[in-house]
């Protein structure tokens, strides 16, 4: 997808990530299983999922993993950028051939992106997590801070705490803000944050439907059983694909506004949306 503000929003299948599976960096056997789980991205976590006494081991294990390339993109969430560990983590991991991207927690503004870019010292894809009121306010500035920024997303657990929220209703504005900022920056739509109850697949499906309606694309997960639910929720239905194909066929003969046989009025913005739907449908095919 284009990284140019206001740029094209048609996604190629290789650009579409629907499922992002978090795994603890100090559990290499779990990471190995995750690579075969069917997740679009394996997110190795060096931050919240790793106890303080195992941080060094998690970094060593992750560096060993990334010494080789893998069929599945491997992203790594480093520790807080203002803490004592992140600089060494970024410097060590950025040159490794198996690293797909770095996920930066608690980003509050462009200065945090600049810090990570300097530590990396080479082109490295970065995904910024916005987990505070300040981070949400700076969403567009973060999204456009550097060409290395490939995506932004909310870290909702920390954001809830920062805002003093008691239920999800208080996150509505922040969710809309990050979706709009990503689109304005020409980035892919952000994935939803994790759904914490791994047993409640029905609740996960409902939550994903709500997120899709808001403009999110895909979701981070904390258990492999969540992956098929997320994938199905964000793929277009057969009816949506058929409708999109009809629009694209009609537009091929007329570049302006047109009316379909059933009377629906179609303009270029609707055609662009139809192309996005068809691109996403191709993700089902692999």
Image (cartoon, rainbow, N blue to C red):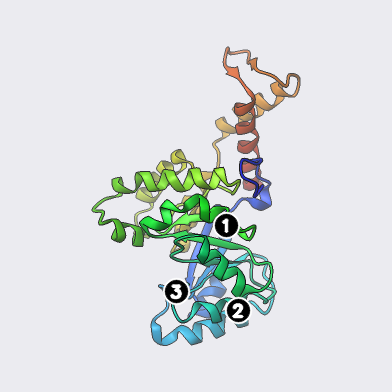
Which residue extends farthest front? 111
Q: Specify the quadrant of the image occupied by residue 47.
A: bottom left
Q: Which mark is residue 145?
A: 1
Quick check: 172 left or right of 261? left
Q: Which residue is mark 2?
A: 91
Q: CA distance from mark 3 to mark 2?
A: 15 Å
Quick check: 253 left or right of 233? right
Question: Disc 3 on helix, strand or loop?
Answer: loop
Q: CA distance from mark 1 to mark 3?
A: 18 Å
Quick check: 12 left or right of 19? right
Measured as percent of width and height from the top left, residue 154 is found at 43, 55
Q: Which mark is residue 82?
A: 3
Tell which tag, 3 or 2, sits nearer the viewer. Answer: 3
Measured as percent of width and height from the top left, residue 178 is found at 46, 48
Label 3 environment density (alpha carbons within 10 Å; few <14, some 14–19, many ≥20): few
Q: For the point 44% across and 61% down, which residue is it?
A: 108
Q: CA distance from mark 1 to mark 2?
A: 20 Å
Q: Specify the quadrant of the image occupied by residue 135.
A: bottom left
Upstream in sequence: badge 1 or badge 2: 2
Upstream in sequence: badge 1 or badge 3: 3
Vertical order, 276 against 24 (above or below) = above
């Amino acid at each position: 997808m284009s990284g140019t503000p206001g740029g094209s929003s048609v996604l190629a299948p290789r650009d579409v990530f629907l499922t992002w599976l978090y795994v603890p960096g100090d559990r290499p056997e779990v990471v190995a299983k995750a690579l075969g789980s069917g997740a679009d991205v394996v997110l190795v976590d060096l931050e919240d999922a790793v106890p303080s006494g195992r941080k060094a081991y998690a970094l060593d294990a992750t560096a060993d993993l990334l010494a080789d390339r893998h069929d599945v993109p491997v992203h790594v969430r480093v520790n807080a950028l203002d803490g004592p560990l992140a600089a060494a983590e970024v410097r060590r991991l950025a040159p490794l051939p198996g690293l797909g991207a770095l996920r930066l927690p608690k980003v509050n503004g462009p200065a945090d992106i600049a810090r990570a870019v300097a530590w990396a010292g080479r082109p490295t894809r970065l995904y910024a997590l916005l987990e505070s009121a300040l981070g949400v306010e700076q969403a567009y500035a973060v999204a456009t801070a550097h060409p290395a920024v490939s995506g932004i997303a909310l870290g909702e657990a920390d954001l809830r705490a920062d805002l003093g929220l008691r239920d999800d209703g208080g996150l509505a504005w922040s969710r809309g803000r990050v979706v709009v900022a990503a689109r304005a920056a020409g980035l892919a739509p952000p994935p939803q944050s994790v759904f914490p109850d791994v047993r409640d697949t029905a609740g996960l499906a409902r939550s994903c439907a709500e997120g899709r309606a808001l403009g999110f694309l895909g979701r981070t997960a904390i258990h492999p059983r969540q992956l098929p639910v997320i994938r199905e929720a964000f793929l277009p239905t057969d009816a949506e694909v058929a409708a999109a194909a009809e629009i694209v066929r009609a537009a091929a003969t007329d570049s302006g506004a047109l009316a379909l046989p059933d009377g629906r009025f179609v303009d270029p913005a609707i055609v662009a949306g139809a192309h996005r739907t068809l691109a996403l449908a191709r993700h089902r095919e692999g």
